[in-house]
Image: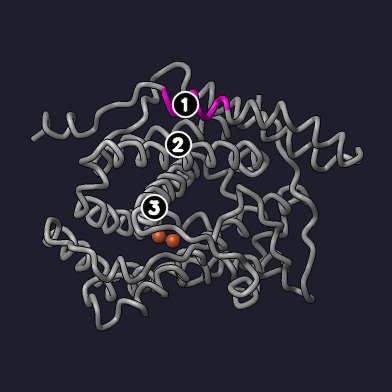
Amino acid sequence: MVTAFTPPEATTLRPGIKAPVKETLLTPRFYTTDFEAIANMVLDLQDEEIAAALEELRADYNRHHFVRDENFDSAIDHLDKKTRAAFIDFLERSCTSEFSGFLLFKELSRKLKGRSPVLAEAFGLLARDEARHAGFINKAMVDFGLSLDLGYLTKQRTYTFFPPEWVIYSVYLSEKIGYWRYILVFRHLEQHPEHNLYPLFNYFENWCQDENRHGDFFKALLRSQPKMWDTWQGRLWGRFFLLTVFATHTMTVFERADFYEALGMDAKQYNIDVIRNTNTTTARAFAEIMDTDNPKFFELLEDCSQANEKLAEITLGDRPYLVKLLLKIPQIATIIWSLLRLYFLKPIDAEALRSEVH
Ligand SMILES: [Fe+2]
Ligand SMILES: [Fe+2]
């Protein structure tokens, strides 16, 4: 059973400009990295794949895609208050995460200019796509009477430092999980047009192909660095990032079950489908993937998510600070324990699968 967390009413920074939500472990982060190390990366092993991915980015298949049509006019008039709140929350998360990609790619492109022309161009094209995505969602927020001040967000957010390898693991995964998130919503609404409440979803089919291409570019980067998949450390890091992305996805989907229910989707099943598909896709890049068929796998992820919901309830409650802290301890322990057990579930050796296929 999925119990939804009700997003708080939107607060505004200025009239029509939404105040960003408080940063938590689950809100999309902004990243910075060691640009020098990326400029010095040797990419020879994947020269051809990187050139092919760059060609795909240059082709710019979606240059005419992100144009609003008349379907947006008064599209939200029929939405009730609860659905609107769930939509605003979804749009803000998505816009922030697209925009966070834009900032990182733009900075990479700027810093690598003159040092690594192929990467500089590729990151510039990735930034182009993410700017389009973020801008398109921000326009959708205007339909709801709000928008995000992206300039304010750029300055106000804290930036997390990730070494280049962590950036590559996590951006690869977020592009591929982004692809599956968008395409599964699109396919569901194609089957059930009566639940297609807002025209933004009509754009998801081509949109997710951008994310897929971004993922392919990062896959080539990842495979160009053997230490990221051909060493025991690479295996452990890969699994760590898989687990982090899957746990965050589960918690977010369960917290936002209202949104998926508004679209006639079962949040629990959607989470399972996104994770299974992303995990299978990842076998083309990572040395190891998770065994999602292990009966414990989704059970433990859902334990984390339930503990996370209880934590949110405790935080929102009006008990004294110390009582809240005491109540939180068992929930935090459940999350840590479940994550540890997940991490040590026997993984699937993707390298072995790959050599069987070839
Ligand atoms: Fe995007
Ligand atoms: Fe992307």
| Disc 3 secondary structure class | helix
Instruction: Specify the principal SS of the magenta part.
Output: helix
Magenta stretch contains residue 343? yes
| Disc 2 secondary structure class | helix
Q: Which residue is mark 1?
A: 342
Q: Which residue is mark 2?
A: 243
Tell me what residue is drawn at x 36 percent, y 41 percent: 237
Q: Quadrant of residue 351 in the image?
A: top left
Residue 330 in the figure: left or right of residue 69: right
Q: CA distance from mark 3 to mark 2?
A: 13 Å
Residue 310, given in percent of the width and then of the height, sits at: 74, 32
Q: Which residue is mark 3?
A: 166
Residue 200, given in percent of the width and then of the height, sits at: 53, 59
Tell me what residue is drawn at x 66 percent, y 24 percent: 1
Residue 178, given in percent of the width and then of the height, sits at: 43, 50
Looking at the image, residue 159 lies above or below residue 230 = below
Quadrant of the picture in which ligand 1 is shown: bottom left
Residue 197, given in percent of the width and then of the height, sits at: 61, 51
Q: CA distance from mark 3 to mark 1?
A: 20 Å
Residue range corresponding to the magenta coloring:
337-344
Q: CA distance from mark 1 to mark 2?
A: 8 Å
